[in-house]
Image (cartoon, grey):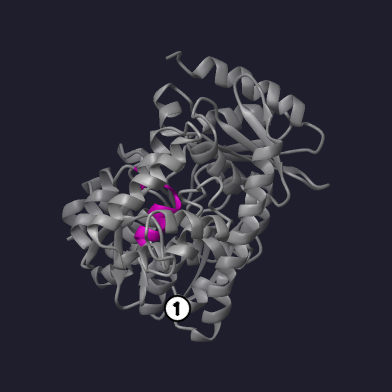
Amino acid sequence: MIEEILDKKLYDNINKACEKVRGESYVRVLAHNDGDGVSSAIILLNALKKLNIKFHLSFVKSLDNEGFRQLFEEEKNPLTIVVDAGSSQIPGIIDYDNYIILDHHFYNPVDGIRGININIRDYGINGTREACGSTMAYIFSLVLDESNRNLFPFFLSGVTSDKQDIGGLSGLNKTIYDAYNTYSIKHTLNLEGNLGDAITYSLDPFFNGLTGNPDAVRGFLQSLNINFDKNILDLNDDENKVLANALALKLLENNIGSDGIRYIEGDTLYYSDLNFTSKELVSIIDGNSRVGENSLPVQYFLGDNSVRLEMLNNIKIYKTKLIDYIYRANSEITEEKYLRYFYAPESEMAGPIAGAIALYLMRPDKPVIGFNSGNDDIKISSRGTRALIARGLNLSEVMSIACKKAGGSGGGHDIAAGGVIPPGREKIFIEAASEIIKSQIHPL
């Protein structure tokens, strides 16, 4: 079926890469260390396991060419699959040829590529909206063996982690979803589990004043005559409607844009073979990734049940910490004419903090940029909204140019991008980023 779905050139190039994999007894996998990258890794490792190919997984934390090359060279040139990263890092490994890249990010093509670089953007597909790392991993696994269709839940968890589900799936993501989803669907609020905990620990959406405040949540639900301990999936139609309207009003109090409102509800799938809903799976993978335990979901979904409790406990640890950071960053944010910025206590938190502020706590008129604190190089995460993208914002370009002017490097998506600069260069970066954003965004 996958051969009928994909463009012939794309299918042929993936099939060429798959033939290369089939001839190996050992493959190294490098995956980006976020929710999309971890989902992608779970797909690829399960596909390799099915073929009895041994593997070793490492996570890509540094996206600059030097850091990427150091990671790449930790082993003596085995066949390496790079997923959810790699295209922009080719200049760092230009002298190597034994690799396969499965990517969806913006990149500048270079001459002299000796390996296999499969970036979905080269086939006319929008890598910000229509395909992500897990999309690439999933179609690769299907070309490798159509029976890998059972890895669908991890395709969707990557898509959701990358926020490509907001407003509904589109492009290749939707085509894959329609062709391979066999699970039951329920359209419900974008929450998980019992309502009290669901709202208290809700990050997407983030409800200012309710998220992180169980007493306020209890009072809020009592005012609606809805049981604090009721499971989200057990709400009747009237309760769903009342709660959805009340939560939407809560979001509107912050003058947020349509992106945030859209994320109030969505389709929930129940994965009977995994015993998780689609929302729970995203929380597991993304939450563990954010607290540096990327490998636990990988271990568990490769069959190691011994890590289940630790994996699940990490979700609340992550959410509790992140909620505190979001409120703190929001209260300390610095307003510039063309952007907002803050300092995050931990580098892995800057992205989700920026995302929550951009979507749920501020007007959607400027991108939000987060700097990590520390003595080493400054890591930067930036987030925008689809409304800003429609007006011309491209954070990949902003991060690439502004980081370079500040002595570092960066890139990513138009709506979410990251970078690294030397310490003490934040002012240079902010000035450069402001000028670029000013030139990009069209007036209303």
Residue at (77% x, 44% y) in the render: 377
Left or right of 162, for residue 172: left
Residue 140's spot in the image, x, y percent?
A: 34, 60
Screen quadrant of the C terminus: top left
Give the vertical position of 189 relative to 171 (above or below): below
Depth order, front residue of 7/151: 151
Residue at (42% x, 45% y) in the render: 104
Amino acid on which disc 1 is placed? Leu
Depth order, front residue of 68/263: 263
Kindly identify which residue carries mark 1. Answer: 302
Residue at (55% x, 74% y) in the render: 311
Residue at (64% x, 64% y) in the render: 292
Depth order, front residue of 328/368: 328
Give the vertical position of 377 relative to 98 (above or below): above
Left or right of 281, for residue 270: left
Give the vertical position of 51 relative to 60 (above or below): below
Residue 255's spot in the image, x, y percent?
A: 48, 31
Q: What stretch is highlighted in magenta?
A: 155-166
Residue 89's spot in the image, x, y percent?
A: 57, 45
